Image: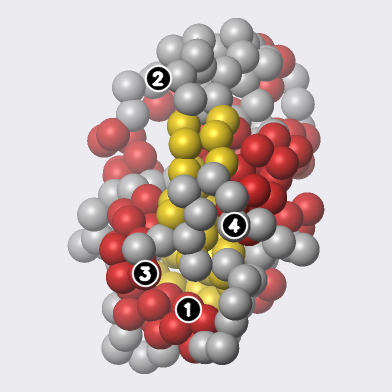
Amino acid sequence: MNQPPHQEPKAAVVAEVRRRLAGRRAPLLVALDGGSGVGKSTLAAAIAAEFDATVVAGDDFFANDRLDAAWDVRTPAERAGQCIDRRRLRTEALAPLLAGRAAAWHPFDAERPGAGVAARVVTRRPAAVIILEGVYSCHPELSDLIDLSVLVDAPAAVRRRRHDGRERTDQATWHARWDGAEDYYFTHARPASSFDLVVSSGPERTPD
């Protein structure tokens, strides 16, 4: 399923969520996936406002038990498969929320690479719509939980400009490490054809 002609990304996703909510009693899990800088967080916030939804940031579950050098010796496929701790994501966030319970977890701490998670705790309330956003959010290992998989797309040059404008890390090193992992993921693990809905954030959108 692709984005309907002339329909904004938010409108396309909102319409599909409303359709899938009809007559539903259990929480609906919507996963927004896409490359870095594509606009996932912005879109997630806009959709959440429509449904009073709860948003889970997949980046909170980055596997921060490895230093950068440990990532650099891995293949793109290994980086794509290992960079998100899906066990924690599933057990600490998604399973409780989908059971109608509040969830709490310690998020990734970008200031302490290789040192584990942050001391602070993120809490989220249960809701009828749960939105999981972040690169690798639609990984096949989570497919049994996801009710609507959405790929948010934008031209590579636009995504790179957005990403580099918001990050404080060394960009050349970051891209050398993670561009290949994202390319592998969206080519082999989760090609566009495997998503329920594909929307384009376009060059004029606000970065995520």
Residue at (47% x, 43% y) in the render? 124
Q: Amino acid at mark 2?
A: Asp
CA–CA distance in space, label 1 to label 4: 18 Å
Query: What amino acid does circle 1 point to?
Result: Val
Using a 10 Å C-alpha cutoff, classify the residue at mark 4 as few (fewer than 14 neighbours), some (14 to 19) or many (20 or more). Answer: some
Where is residue 63, by image quadrant? top right
Name the residue carrying label 3: 51
Residue 69, compared with residue 36, is above or below; it is above
User: Which of 152/132 is in front?
Assistant: 132
**Mark 1 or mark 4, which is nearer to you?**
4
Disc on res. 100: 4
User: Marks 3 and 4, how far apart in space?
Assistant: 16 Å
Q: Which corner quadrant of the image does residue 139 belong to?
A: bottom right
The residue singled out by tag 2 in the image is: 170
Q: Amino acid at mark 3?
A: Phe
Numbered disc in front, either 4 or 2? 4
Q: Percent from the top left, x then y, of residue 202?
A: 31, 66
Task: Determine whether label 1 and label 4 are within 8 Å by CB.
Answer: no
Secondary structure beneath dot 4 equals loop
Q: Who comes first in sequence, dot 3 or dot 4? A: 3
Q: Secondary structure at mark 3?
A: helix
Q: Which tag is nearer the camera, tag 2 or tag 1?
A: 1
Q: Secondary structure at mark 2?
A: loop
| Res. 140 image quadrant | bottom right
